[in-house]
Image (cartoon, helix red, strand yellow):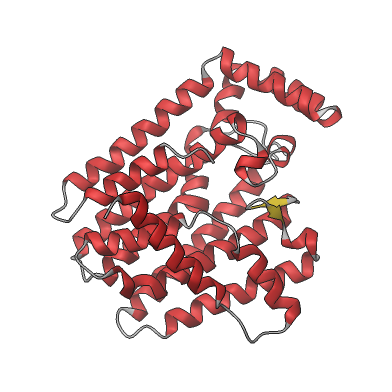
Amino acid sequence: MEFKHLINNYRESINSELKNIYESGPKIIKEPIHHVLKGGKRIRPILCLITSAACGADPKNSLHTSISIELLHNFTLIHDDIMDSDDLRHGSITIHKKWNDSIAILSGDAMLAIALLKLNSLQKHGFLIMKKFNEALIEVCEGQALDLHFQDKEVILEEEYLEMIDKKTAYMIGLSSEIGAILADASQEIQLKMREYGLLIGRAFQIQDDLLEIISDKNKMGKTLESDFLLNKKTYLSIKSRLISNNDINDYIEKANQDFESGFNLYKKFLTKHNVISDTKDTIKNILVSADNILKELNIDKDHLYKYTQLILNRKY
């Protein structure tokens, strides 16, 4: 089957399952949950299914667990949107803006509980996957805490930034590929290697997100771009740019607080002039090459995983 068609089939299966999530709950919780689940790229559950198939299993048997991964991911997004006061997510108004903060928190917490209940029903590997799941939840919370902490620091090291995104973003993507291998009864070595692969995919994905927030627009990204810049959120590009001229970046943020488009455009011109954008693209490519090099060591069906790497590299939003 053609890879693009395969991905579309996986996405349709995931979306079909998500439509039936939490059908019997009260309207005030059910509607926000279904609202946020309407959008999303399904990067994580799709990777779980691809990995499971690559390791020799029927991906249909991993669909149930992949849904829990997507629910956990959306739980974190709801809380992230509240903390960042974002207006858009997946091209739609965020839950806390459409309803309120309290409903958003309750909806996110309900999604987490639903995800855990689904895992609790696993007949095989349930204890191990639940353990991995909870470890990932702690990592995401730590990453979000670091993200908030770094807002109060004008300059951070690249190593600090990478630790933050590995926890906040990459760990969950690594979990997705690791769980796919676990569900396929792959060896422990393959499980660990698939987690390493997923972690690198996740690191590249987040740096790419940082880049797309500069070179794309909020209609394509499906989320507001202003908050990260105005709140001095640390991105790969902001770290690199502050090493060149910290004062200039502060000036652009100050100007953007008065006139966002004017200040933001000055920032983009600065990034282009000093090759920060081109250097970031090279960094993403190098990380993804490292991810593919991990696959070369494994005796599994790697073709679709290689294509998944290219899917991440070539995404536009």
Q: Quadrant of residue 291?
A: top left
Q: Can residue 111 be seen in this view?
A: yes
Is 66 above or below relative to 267? Answer: below
Depth check: give the residue in front, 217 or 149.
Answer: 217
Give the side of residue 231 with respect to residue 132, left or right.
right
- Most distant residue in the top direction: 273
Give the side of residue 126 with respect to residue 223, left or right.
left
Residue 97 at what x, y percent from top left? Answer: 79, 58
Q: Is residue 175 visible?
A: no
Is 53 above or below relative to 161? Answer: below
- Most distant residue in the right direction: 258
Depth check: give the residue in front, 271 or 309.
Answer: 309
Residue 238 at what x, y percent from top left? Answer: 60, 29
Give the side of residue 62 with respect to residue 12, left or right.
left
Q: Which residue is drawn at 76% across and 77% down?
A: 28
Give the side of residue 231 with respect to residue 144, left or right.
right
Q: In which quarter of the image is the C terminus?
A: top right
Residue 1 at what x, y percent from top left? Answer: 26, 55
Q: Quadrant of residue 172?
A: bottom left
Q: Which residue is drawn at 86% across and 28% down?
A: 258
Q: Residue at x 68, y 41 (%)?
A: 151
Residue 123 at what x, y percent from top left? Answer: 33, 86
